Amino acid sequence: MLSKLFARKKMTNEEERNDLEDRVCSMLHDQKMINIIPIITNVMYGTLVQLENTEKVWSEIKDIIDRGIQKHKEKKDGIS
């Protein structure tokens, strides 16, 4: 399972974000919410290092987690 979480493939920034949101959603669904931040920083490293300051990095990470949580709620409620 962890090898799947850390698997790297060539993706655009938007594909990376969507993939990470799905991972957050999946971990919430499986009630296995391990520390997601290292996974996000590993996958999004190239994008995150280009951001101007720490505040923007945390904002990007928070947005990914929030959207993953939203996807989880929608699946749980039967919307998606």
Image (tube, rainbow, N blue to C red):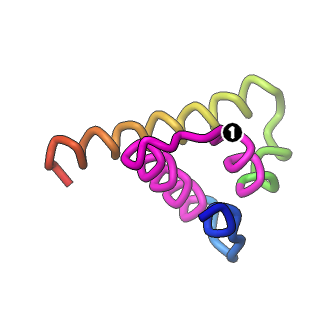
Give the residue at x 70% y 63%: 6
Q: Give coordinates of residue 53: x percent, y percent.
A: 83, 28
Q: Is residue 39 left or right of residue 62?
A: right
Quarter in which the N terminus is drawn: bottom right
Relative vertical location of residue 6 with respect to residue 23 in this rendering, above or below: below
State the image quarter where residue 69 is shown.
top left
Q: Secondary structure at mark 1?
A: helix
Q: Is residue 44 left or right of residue 17?
A: right
Give the residue at x 74% y 44%: 38
User: Identity of the amino acid at label 1?
Assistant: Ile
Give the residue at x 48% y 48%: 27
How many labels sit on residues? 1
Relative vertical location of residue 78 with respect to residue 7 in this rendering, above or below: above
- Circle 1 residue: 37
Determine the main secondary structure of the stretch shown in magenta. Answer: helix
**16 falls in the magenta region:** yes
Q: Give coordinates of residue 77: x percent, y percent.
A: 16, 41
Relative vertical location of residue 65 with respect to residue 58 in this rendering, above or below: below
**4 falls in the magenta region:** no
Q: Give coordinates of residue 41: x percent, y percent.
A: 75, 46
Quarter in which the C terminus is drawn: bottom left
Give the residue at x 79% y 39%: 51
Q: Looking at the image, which residue sits at the far left? A: 78
Q: Give coordinates of residue 46: x percent, y percent.
A: 81, 56
Q: Viewer-proximal residue, 59 or 20?
A: 20
Range of magenta residues: 14-43
Q: Residues within 10 Å of mark 1 (few under 14, many from 20)?
A: some
Q: Viewer-proximal residue, 4 or 62?
A: 4
Q: Looking at the image, which residue sits at the far bottom? A: 10
